[in-house]
Image (cartoon, rainbow, N blue to C red):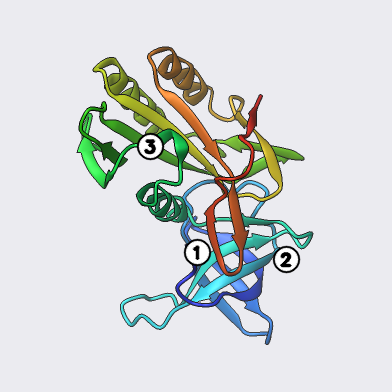
Amino acid sequence: MKFATPLIPARLIRRYKRFLADCQLEDGREVTAHCANPGSMMGLAEPGEKIWLEPNDDPKKKLKYGWRLVDHENGHFTGVDTSVPNKALRKALEAGEIPELAAYQTVRPEVKYGENSRIDFLLTQPGLPDAYVEVKSVTLSREPGLAEFPDSVTARGTKHLGELAAMAEHGHRAIMLYLVQRTDCDRFALAADIDPNYAAAFEVAQEKGVERLIFATQISPDGIKLDVDRPPFGCR
């Protein structure tokens, strides 16, 4: 998934009200960017961080910049836009690039199911059980090489696990897919100390047949895509 507009570098001044970030461009101008991330962004929103913004000229948008990346300035990046995983995953699913799901030819996003919820993707194919795929963006890393989810308490995420478990009990495939939007990690773990309820719900969901998939991403100021050729993440 390529960014619609070439990104420009900036320095973070502050992130506030979850969805706003004041930034300084290289020419010294200060601008406010939209931050499409409702999480805590632990470790990613320190003043002075090098970041990348996507400018836009859409008259319907109040803010003319969107915060897309954190540049760790060591060759690694983190994608902070939580809408990106679904966009990147949709392209990969439609292209049949994910071996575990390549047999499904029909990909439907945002389908209603469960208790007033929407599944990120419903995959269907004659002769196969329907596959319900829930996607989560992973950006937290508190230990070198280890990606963790969640970065804050997520009652919504816990609810999704319960609904996936119900789909599995009804004979469908139910998949919890974690997309790691960091290029500096090769292991994954649930952050049970941050949200023990989510971790407990995940254990129950697995016992009921919910599958777990974890994928890395290739990230640069040009775009973000699934790294389907990278070896699977180790889990802790």
Most distant residue in the top direction: 207
**Residue sitting farthest toward the bottom:** 27
Q: Which mark is residue 134?
A: 3
Q: Which residue is mark 1?
A: 20
Image marks 1 and 3: residues in contact by CB distance under 8 Å? no
Relative to 224, say whether 180 is above or below: above
Residue at the image position 28 percent from the left and 15 percent from the top: 169
* Residue corresponding to mark 2: 48
Q: Nearer the viewer, residue 235 or 131?
A: 131
Q: CA distance from mark 2 to mark 1?
A: 16 Å
Task: Identify the secondary structure beneath mark 2.
Answer: loop
Q: Quadrant of residue 9 in the image?
A: bottom right
Q: Are marks 3 and 2 in contact (CB under 8 Å)?
A: no
Q: Secondary structure at mark 3?
A: strand
Query: Can you give x and y, in whole percent of width and height, for residue 178 in the image?
Result: 50, 38
For this view, does 104 lie left or right of residue 85? Answer: left
Residue 220 lies in quadrant: bottom right
Please indicate whether residue 100 sits to the left or right of residue 196 in the image: left
Depth order, front residue of 31/220: 220
Residue at 41% over, 19% down: 205
